[in-house]
Image: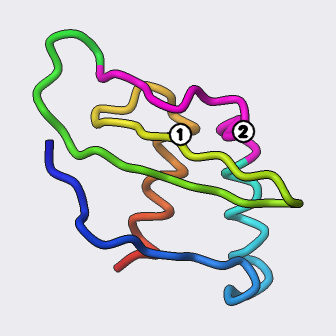
Amino acid sequence: MPERSEPVTIDTDDLPHEEARELERLVDAAGFFELPETSQPPRGAPDGFRYTISVTRHGQSHTVKVTDPIEDPDVQALVEYLEAKAR
């Protein structure tokens, strides 16, 4: 499965206020801190991109690995936002 080779760091302190709020909203909507560390793609799905996402907030850290296609629309929205910011 393809994976970006070098990590990208996005710090909400470096974002405009509205963008930082949107990222926080997406993390909350995805229930990020309750997600399992690894999720498998749906059965029969072709190999897709694999994403490793780490979030640190209020002293709590969590890392999640997800693979395309992502079934949860809230997690998909978070991944799309992060992809756009990583460009």
Along the line of sight, the residue nearer the viewer: 22 or 63: 63
Q: What is the chief secondary structure element of the magenta stretch? A: loop
Identity of the amino acid at label 1? Val
Please tell me whether residue 61 is drawn above or below residue 74 in the rendered image.
below
Q: To which residue does mark 2 refer? A: 33
Q: Is residue 27 left or right of residue 72?
A: right
Q: Is residue 69 magenta?
A: no
Q: Secondary structure at mark 2?
A: helix
Q: Quadrant of residue 32?
A: top right
Quadrant that contains the N terminus: top left
Q: Residue at x 51, y 48 (%)?
A: 77
- How crowded pointer 1 is (Cα within 10 Å; few <14, some 14-19, many 20+) is rated as many
**Disc ID at residue 75:** 1
Q: Secondary structure at mark 1?
A: helix
Q: Residue at x 52, y 76 (%)?
A: 9
Tell me the magenta residue range. Answer: 28-41
Please tell me whether residue 37 is drawn above or below residue 77 in the rendered image.
above
Identity of the amino acid at label 2? Phe
- Give how far across and how far down residue 72 sits, in percent: 50, 28
Q: Is residue 35 left or right of residue 25?
A: left
Mark-to-mark CA distance, 2 and 1: 12 Å
Q: Is residue 35 magenta?
A: yes
In front of the other: label 2 or label 1? 2
